[in-house]
Amino acid sequence: MRPVIGVGMVGYAFMGRAHSQAWRSVDAFFDLPLRPSMVAVAGRSAEATAQAAEKLGWAGAETDWKRLLDRDDVQIVDICSPGDSHAEIAVAALAAGKHVICEKPLANTVAEAEAMAAAAKEAAARGVRSMVGFNYRGLGYEHAFVHETKDFLEAIAAGTDPTPSFEDGLRVQRVLAAVEQSAAEDSRFITVEGS
Ligand SMILES: NC(=O)c1ccc[n+]([C@@H]2O[C@H](COP(=O)([O-])OP(=O)(O)OC[C@H]3O[C@@H](n4cnc5c(N)ncnc54)[C@H](O)[C@@H]3O)[C@@H](O)[C@H]2O)c1
């Protein structure tokens, strides 16, 4: 019997639907070392979150994402909420020992992305994995996240760091910030740290 790994997802709109599709089908399509269980989705409105849970295939619904961190049956937190919420949720989830897969862009600011990359590095030393949801895999939304969740589950089982990492997300965040700054400063050339 393969071990079961519980997933809790935050946000159930566009990306939440795409990720739910992945969690529902990844185990049927691939031969995986772990069997994902869709434990709960977190939203804000009780009624809408319960409806989303039923439609998308989640066993439970929570109205505060922090509840996912308290649950022993959740080992992975999947962040599909807007960018301004990523840093707080990811840093808290990693500190709580949850593996984290976070939608892209990693954050809204370089400072947030730096905090997330630092938290991911510290968590990796404890065997806690993190990955950012760049869908580099060149497939449609209905397929890309199936491959993404497969890669994440295999890395967790193997005890290796999956890619793209939060550090990769931080690099992209620096480029995004430089583009924004350049646009605000008459297309001035901006050197990106670490490039
Ligand atoms: N990988 C990709 O190709 C891709 C494509 C589109 C969007 N995204 C990213 O995915 C994320 C979500 O995008 P979306 O288009 O689904 O966003 P959206 O704004 O349509 O939906 C966000 C969801 O999060 C929920 N939410 C907001 N605050 C919350 C909170 N505090 N607690 C719980 N739930 C909360 C909302 O109710 C909603 O369900 C964003 O980071 C976005 O940049 C990635």
Image: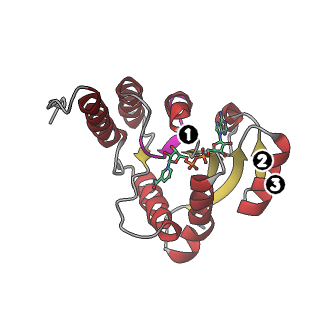
Asked whether 8 falls inside the magenta stretch, the response is: no
The reply to whether the residue tagged 1 has its Cβ within 8 angstroms of ligand 1 is yes
Residue drawn where x is 73% and y is 56% of the image: 58
According to the image, label 2 marks what residue? Answer: 49
Q: How far apart are marks 1 and 2 (CA)?
A: 16 Å
Q: Could you say which quadrant of the image residue 157 lies in?
A: bottom left
Q: Do the residues labelled 3 and 2 touch (CB within 8 Å)?
A: yes
Q: Do the residues labelled 3 and 1 touch (CB within 8 Å)?
A: no
Q: What residue type is labelled 2?
A: Thr
Residue span colored magenta: 94-105
- Judged left or right of residue 43, residue 33 is left
Q: How far apart are marks 3 and 1 (CA)?
A: 20 Å
Q: Disc 1 or 2, which lies upstream in sequence?
A: 2
- Judged left or right of residue 119, residue 69 is right
Q: Disc 3 or 1, which lies upstream in sequence?
A: 3
Asked whether 95 falls inside the magenta stretch, the response is: yes
Q: What residue type is labelled 3?
A: Gln
**SS of the residue under disc 3:** helix
Q: How many marks?
A: 3
Q: Could you say which quadrant of the image residue 127 lies in?
A: top left
Spot the residue most to the front.
Answer: 186
Q: Which mark is residue 51?
A: 3
Q: Nearer the viewer, mark 1 or mark 2?
A: 1
Residue drawn where x is 30% and y is 42% of the image: 168
Crowd tier of the residue under label 2, counting other residues whose Cα lies within 10 Å: few below 14, some 14–19, many 20 or above: many
